[in-house]
Amino acid sequence: MSRIETVKKSGPVIERRSIDFVPHGERHGKPFGQFTLWFGANMQITAIVTGALAVIFGSDAFWGIIGLFIGNILGGTVMALHAAQGPKLGMPQMISSRAQFGVFGAVIPLVLVIIMYLGFAATGAVLAGQAVGQIIPTGHPAVGVIIFGALTVLVATLGYKYIHALGRISTIVGILGFSYLAVQLFLKHDVVAVLGVGGFAFPTFLLAISLSAGWQLTYGPYVADYSRYLPANTPAGRTFLSCFSGSVLGAQWSMTLGALFAAIAMPKGHEFLDGQVAFVGELSGGGAIAILLYLVVVVGKLTVNTLNAYGGYMTILTSVSAFTRQLRFAPWVRFAYVIGFIAVSVIIAIAASADFISNFKNFVLLLLMVFIPWSSINLVDFWLVSKEKVDVPALYDPKGRYGAWNVPALLTYLLGVVVQVPFLAQSMYTGPITPLLGGADISWLVGLVVTAVVYYPVARKFQRPPAEMVYPIEETAAAEPVNSPSA
Ligand SMILES: Nc1ccnc(=O)[nH]1
């Protein structure tokens, strides 16, 4: 038992748990914490870039903003349905997907998710590194990236409590900074003049919806990680609403700014695209205010990048522990994994910052394709088939209820990936149906719906969910959830 004692000795400063079940006695917090974390995580420059892309790819600013809003609501619903699982599960989302795919089978979506987090961490570090470079000019872009990476390692290593604290800071900083930007935008530019000039076009409207829906869907694999310490009897509706409203409002605010930036900068020749971070500084009017706005950029990116690092390290641990069968990990193990993960992202960021925008768009839409079916299978199983009941010990046992490889689920997953191919609109590949839709990529919607419709009867036939939630043995001795939702 020496391993567990090492964990305990480190005290409460650094989080003790990783992919193991959070006992009811350690549950704390209120659903409102979901709002601030996800609002803060979305008040960031990459969301601004995503909003700008809607206009750059041809949407009128007004219709682009409406399309982005619809996409945020659709994608945000899926994302918050994952979040609402956290208090019940008491553990990270990706380990719970062993309930659908089997203890080894879950490794397939896990590896893809790890690559996605790495990509986000790398692309995010490029932008945040630029902002750090504006605050502390060294002449070497790599220095900003490395400083940002070090900050990410710090917060992700401290863990859950500090990540939520950063979310609260980021919410306040984001509201102040983004309000200032909005005011400057309206004072310096004739914003109303750029609205509605392009008219409505269905393909570009669909594209705007897909961009923001895709943005929200990327949070699915890790959003429940940040609600897993909430008391198990927290009403799912409250977790859902807090998370949903935070993520949708934060993203919509950022994306609206982005769509307007792009609409205004475009006639003068893609200014926003040429240097997103510098554009924000210029809009602020320069000087001390610009420095403050660069700080706003760094804080927003730090929040979401910490989620990438923390979610990334737990996903890697989940994959590794399928084979090693280890259950608990000491804080130094987290530190080692987080540092390894961030080091790789920093190296990619330094090596590959050119052509950032087009790579970013392709990257998000391409990776979405491989885990949209994961999202669909997870949600259908948890909410409709297993009906919120999980056998927690069996998640750690390839010979248990969930087995090693769940072949029906894995085949459905494969189908969910393949069915999207005709609908793809990628720089490397455009599906045969895409031109009929004017070039818009709706593969995400096809993937979500087809996978859900196929998986439901499959799961009804093959899944054997427990009649009641099964907790680890040490928990069953204790009474059921001890904290009230408002504790
Ligand atoms: N899931 C994410 C979306 C956007 N940016 C990130 O860094 N991560």
Image: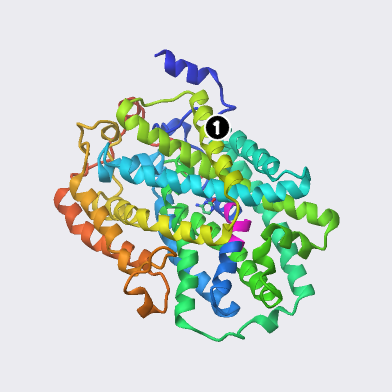
> Which x, y percent locates residue 18?
45, 32
Image position of 329 with respect to 312: above or below: above
Q: Is residue 299 visible?
A: no
The amino acid type of the residue labelled 1 equals Ile
Residue pictured at 55% horizontal, 38% vertical: 342
> Which x, y percent locates residue 228?
44, 41
Give whichever of 74, 29 is nearer the camera: 74
Residue pictured at 44% horizontal, 60% vertical: 365
The span picked out in magenta is: 41-48
- The image quadrant where one finds the N terminus is top left
- Quarter of the view holding residue 327: top left
- Quarter of the view holding residue 55: bottom right
Magenta stretch holds residue 164: no
Secondary structure mostly seen in magenta is helix
- Quarter of the view holding residue 154: top right
> Which x, y percent locates residue 248?
53, 62
Give whichever of 381, 413 is nearer the camera: 413
> Which x, y percent locates residue 387?
27, 50
Circle 1 is placed at which residue position? 339
Residue pictured at 49% horizontal, 16% vertical: 6
245 sits left or right of 144 in the view:
left
- Which SS class for mark 1? helix
Magenta stretch holds residue 43: yes
Query: Coloring scheme of the render?
Result: rainbow
110 sits left or right of 304 in the view:
left
Mark count: 1
